[in-house]
Image: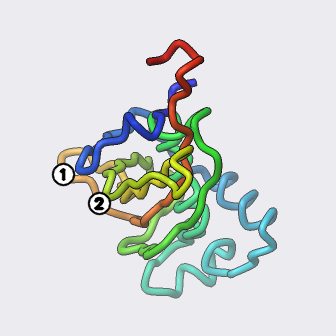
Amino acid sequence: MTGLYYEEFEVGETIEHAKRRTISEADNQRFCDMTMNQQPLHLDADFAGETQFGERIVNGLYTMSLAVGLTIPETTDGTIVANLSYDDVEHPNPVFHGDTIRARSTVTDKRETSDGERGVVTMRVEAFKVVDGDDDVLVCELERTVLSEKRRADDGSE
């Protein structure tokens, strides 16, 4: 378990996540197939070639899911009760097959639950495509709110 307990989150803290992922054509195809999203902009090279993008773009929901997945080891792995919400999702730039994605989380809010037994933590998650020699390009951002475990006095962690 590498995730953080509620008490370990600090408002204002930014975590640069070490894991990255290069998105393949197969990743995008499988995600579209599993979610039954047959949008030709994601799947049809001829169709997408005639758009402003000039080629197929990766499904935005896959990009969002990958962004969240990249954050889990350093934030909520083994310490989460539930994801409560994903809000204010934006996709300011497209992702293409072959792009490598990295993520960053910034803790924006935290509060104990009314019974004091758990905590609610909100993080701003940003995903970037890695560009050599330039600043990375923001491709997805969202607010992720989670219900987090608190440390137990009897688990030897205090």
Which residue is farthest left?
134
Judge whether 97 appears above or below 56 on screen.
above
Distance from Cα at disc 2 to Cα at disc 1: 9 Å
- The residue that label 2 is drawn on is 137
Q: Nearer the viewer, mark 2 or mark 1?
A: 2
Which residue is farthest front?
115
- The residue that label 1 is drawn on is 134
Query: Does residue 66 appear to the left or right of 81 in the view shown?
Result: left
**Residue 114: x percent and y percent?**
52, 58
Proximity of marks 2 and 1: CB atoms separated by less than 8 Å: yes
Q: Nearer the viewer, residue 89 or 3?
A: 3
Residue at left offset 78%, top offset 68%: 35
Residue 31 shows in the view? yes
Instruction: Report crowding for label 1: few under 14, some 14 to 19, many 20 or more residues within 10 A (C-alpha).
Output: few
**Residue 29: x percent and y percent?**
72, 61
Q: Quadrant of residue 158?
A: top left
Residue at left offset 29%, top offset 60%: 137
**Residue 6: x percent and y percent?**
45, 40
Q: Nearer the viewer, residue 115 or 158?
A: 115
Query: Does residue 88 appear to the left or right of 39 in the view shown?
Result: left
Kind of residue at disc 1: Asp
Residue at left offset 68%, top offset 76%: 44
The label on residue 33 is none
Residue at left offset 43%, top offset 66%: 142
Kind of residue at disc 2: Val
Regarding mark 1 in the picture, which secondary structure is present there?
A: loop
Residue 127 shows in the view? no
Q: Nearer the viewer, residue 115 or 142?
A: 115
